[in-house]
Image (spheres, grey):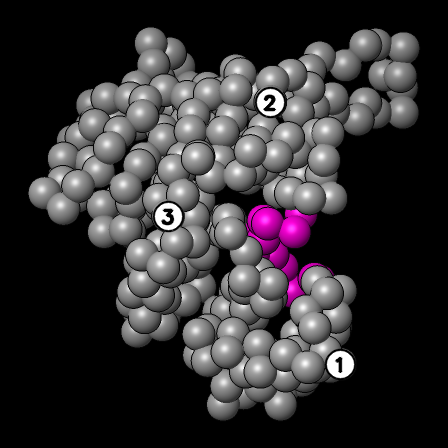
Amino acid sequence: MNALVLDSVSKSFYPRLGLFAWRRKPAAIRAVRQVSLAVERGDILVLLGPNGSGKSTLLKLVATMLLPDEGRVEVDGVDAVRHPEQVVRKVALAVTNERSFFPRLTARENLDFFATLEEVPAAKRACRVDEVLEISGLTSVSRRLVQSFSAGMYQRLGISRALLKNPALLLLDEPSNSLDPETASAFWTWVKQSARAGTTIALATHSFEEAASVARRVAVLRQGELAAWHAIDTGTSVEELRRCYHQDVRTADDATAMPWKVNRAASA
């Protein structure tokens, strides 16, 4: 069975108009357009694409934080629109924003609170909190107030929170952002080990090195559409992936959209 299926999924947003523009009907911004893909259990899916290509929106649709306007989202055979309560038990999206935590509580106290919300059994709660702190490398600072954390520590705390319920499908949005090299290396090793243990992982990144090192499938998004779908093996090089990516996202209006690139090339 596939762990994740997206079938012709689309999502649009309507911008808020200004005070004197309320009579106008706002034009829809199509963040995701007819995306279809399937991910097997234990696979690592990497989403690549320029800013605004729909990567984060796609992850939020899978996590049921957003509902699709069209199409079908399934997690382990469960329809995310019809049965969101079942999907929420299977899926975790790492939220790394500092506003997602209580600044005057310690890291351990924050995780204990969220473990309660995730219905982690009381008898196993302390042990599970210890496990995720160890995975994220926060054990030594677990009793520090979160308000004193750096951006990288918030990133690691968000990953810890997502792991509390031991999800079948883990969603990560630029997980190595703000991580130091040593922590990032340990994190990617853990990601590969988790996939081998059966956890399905979908993540968005801008790093070709990370994608080439961990991905088994790469979905390239362009303006909300699935531009390409690549299978990755151990022989796929970073440069090969980079070359394919730039071919996938190239459009006829690149020069118009990013004239500074043309100007720099002309002056070189």
Residue 225 pos. (x, y %): 46, 19
- Say which of 132 and 157 sits in front: 132
Please tell me how crowded label 3 is: few (under 14), some (14-19), or many (20+) other residues with Cα within 10 Å. many
Secondary structure under tag 1 reads: loop
User: Is 210 on the left-hand or right-hand side of 135?
Assistant: left
Please tell me how crowded label 2 is: few (under 14), some (14-19), or many (20+) other residues with Cα within 10 Å. some
- Say which of 4 and 96 sits in front: 4
Location of the N terminus (image quadrant): top left
Which callout, 1 or 2, points to the residue nearer the camera? 2
Q: Amino acid at mark 3?
A: Gly
Report which quarter residue 143 is drawn in. bottom right
Residue annotated with mark 3: 42
Q: CA distance from mark 1 to mark 2?
A: 41 Å
- Say which of 134 and 196 sits in front: 196
Residue annotated with mark 1: 104
User: Is 48 on the left-hand or right-hand side of 248?
Assistant: right
Q: Residue at x 43, y 48 (%)?
A: 200
In this rendering, is residue 71 above or below 240? above
Residue 131 pos. (x, y %): 50, 78
Secondary structure under tag 3 reads: loop
Q: Is residue 164 visible?
A: yes
Q: Residue at x 36, y 29 (%)?
A: 220
Secondary structure under tag 2 reads: strand
In this rendering, is residue 226 above or below 153? above
Magenta residues (range): 88-101
Label at residue 214: none
Residue 58 pos. (x, y %): 54, 33
Q: CA distance from mark 2 to mark 3?
A: 21 Å
